[in-house]
Amino acid sequence: MEIETYQVVRPDGSFDADRVPDVDDEALRDLYRWMLLQRVYDNRATKLQRRGRLGTVASGRGQEAAIIGSGFALSQDDWIFPYGREAGALLMHGLSMRDLLLYWRGIEDASKMEGANIFGMAISIGSHIPLATGKAWGMQLAGEESIAFANLGDGATSTGAFHEGMNFAGVLDAPAVYFCQNNQYAISLPFEKQTNADTVAQKALAYGVDGIRVDGNDVLAVYNAVSKARERALEGNPVLVEAVTYRRGAHTTSDDPTRYRSEEEVDEWEKRDPLERYQAFLEETGRWDDIDEEAIREEVEEEFSAAVDAADEFEERGIEEIFSYLHEETPPELQRQLEEFRELLEERPDMYEYIETRPKG
Ligand SMILES: Cc1ncc(C[n+]2csc(CCOP(=O)(O)OP(=O)(O)O)c2C)c(N)n1
Ligand SMILES: [Mg+2]
């Protein structure tokens, strides 16, 4: 089965003029700004984690075009179901950097995501896919002109939840877009060992859903593909988009990728850097001179530092919140566990010490 990989800008910077999206210069510049923000954010967050000030970080390095191109194609009314690497897209859609940092510090509900249509992150791989389908169906029943957008990895397509979510999307004509960032690995497992299918996009066919395959390191191609997918979804045709890309960093800060992949492979993908490719396009079309790269960097660095300060001021609310977070009224079984836990802490306060003494701020 041959599925075309849609592209606008080729790795050498040459491009297909008919495919350049019909957006103004400011939008074209913004795309660069957001990709750079994603890169700077990932660098800073990774360093912060190394200093023990974040629990873990899942970097989007190498995937900036996929993350930003897709986020940029969405409306503020759409609902995003994130999976962890898409900081830039979430910040674009109303999440504050402080709250994002607090999330990676283990505080999930700093903002309760107020003001942003962003669901909790799917740490349990694939679990958000049926939820996105359900949300999309609900929005359709309510007559809303918006879609549910699930961000997922290639690994998520090997879960049962993917199958269920896609199947129901097809059956229900749900206004949903499933955006798979095929970064070639699920932690250490390469794509070929995970599925016998040549592409993710072809899986859509079996569900009676549209499938699009796109060069995930080409921000304009991703933007076009997701814009198109969004239009189709609003007409009641769910779409699976596969963005072919590469995870250049470690899976998370607790992974060592040199143990399972070659330097040559990583070098090969370095050459397909999404920012460099887009810069070449901007230069070619006379837009690069309007971009002050240093100024963007400085601005993001400052924003990041301010977000760290704001996160440091957040008062932790104690272990008991684990028991009260989900339910309006604590059910009897949880109440019992809470009491048991309190007794345990009285007897063995040291059990909780490591959390209390972890580096503050
Ligand atoms: C249901 C479930 N199984 C296993 C894990 C452990 N795990 C965390 S991330 C991951 C791989 C995810 O790969 P992919 O979906 O390709 O996303 P990527 O990290 O490459 O962006 C796995 C197996 C998990 N979080 N949830
Ligand atoms: Mg992956």
Image (tube, helix red, strand yellow):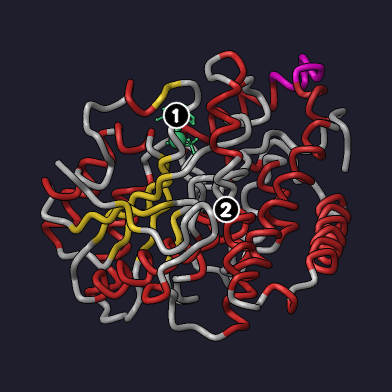
Q: Which mark is residue 228?
A: none
Can you tell me whether the CB of the residue at mark 1 lies under 8 Å from the nearest atom of ligand 1?
yes
Q: Which mark is residue 274?
A: 2
Front residue of 3 and 18: 18
Q: Secondary structure at mark 1?
A: strand
| Mark 2 → mark 1, Cα distance in angstroms | 21 Å
Q: Residue 239's spot in the image, x, y percent?
A: 25, 60
Going from N to C along the chain, the mark reached first, 2 or 1, is: 1
The residue depicted at 36 percent of the width and 37 percent of the height is: 156
Q: Which mark is residue 186?
A: 1
Label 2 crowd (10 A; few <14 / some 14-19 / many >=20): many
Q: Residue 60's spot in the image, x, y percent?
A: 59, 45
Q: Main secondary structure of the magenta part?
A: helix
Residue 124 seen in render: no
| Mark 2 and mark 1 residues within 8 Å of each other at the beta carbon | no
The residue depicted at 11 percent of the width and 57 percent of the height is: 171
Q: Is residue 350 magenta?
A: yes
Range of the magenta residues?
Answer: 344-351
User: With 112 as the anchor, is 246 left or right in this view?
Assistant: left
